[in-house]
Image (cartoon, grey):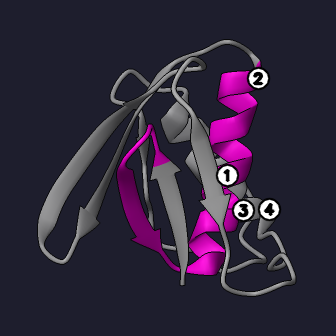
Amino acid sequence: MGYLHYGPSQIFRFDDRALAHLRTVIMTKLLQQESLLFTWNDAGIQRSIWLQPSVPLQFEFEAAETPAINRAWLEELTAVANAPAGLRLLPEPDPGQQH
């Protein structure tokens, strides 16, 4: 399990694999100076945070190796991140799925 550190004191737990994909999408948006809403379910609770370039983020992984990136999942996450409702953590699709 990994952690997303948001701002000075918020810490959220994610599976390393999901976190690696989220990191790619989130950092792409922030490097383009774009803010976004990120929403996910956490033990039955819906959480949302506003991500913007000025808020410090840290991605902490339990594993030393970065998980392999599933291109189909990355494309789905990027598509929702670019939609008005913002990024949502979607289930991982089959790696062979094409868009």
As drawn, the label of residue 72 is: 3
Q: What is the secondary structure assignment of the residue under circle 3?
A: helix
Q: Earlier in the sequence, mark 2 or mark 3?
A: 2
Q: Which residue is mark 4?
A: 71
Whether pointer 2 and pointer 3 mark residues with C-beta atoms closer than 8 Å, the reply is no
Q: Earlier in the sequence, mark 2 or mark 4?
A: 2
Asked if residue 29 lies in the magenta stretch, the reply is yes
Residue 28 spot, x, y in % from top left = 75, 33
As drawn, the label of residue 31 is: 2
Which kind of residue does numbered mark 4 sit on?
Arg
With respect to residue 56, does 14 lie above or below? below
Q: Which residue is mark 1?
A: 23
Whether pointer 3 and pointer 4 mark residues with C-beta atoms closer than 8 Å, the reply is yes
Q: Please give the range of residues in magenta.
A: 6-31
**CA distance separating discs 2 and 1:** 12 Å
Question: Dot 3: few (<14), some (14–19), or many (≥20) neighbours within 10 Å?
Answer: some
* Residue at image location 62% in from the left, 78% down from the top: 16
Q: Earlier in the sequence, mark 1 or mark 4?
A: 1
Residue 77 spot, x, y in % from top left = 57, 49
31 sits to left or right of 38: right
Question: Dot 2: few (<14), some (14–19), or many (≥20) neighbours within 10 Å?
Answer: few
**CA distance separating discs 3 and 4:** 4 Å
Residue 3 spot, x, y in % from top left = 52, 68
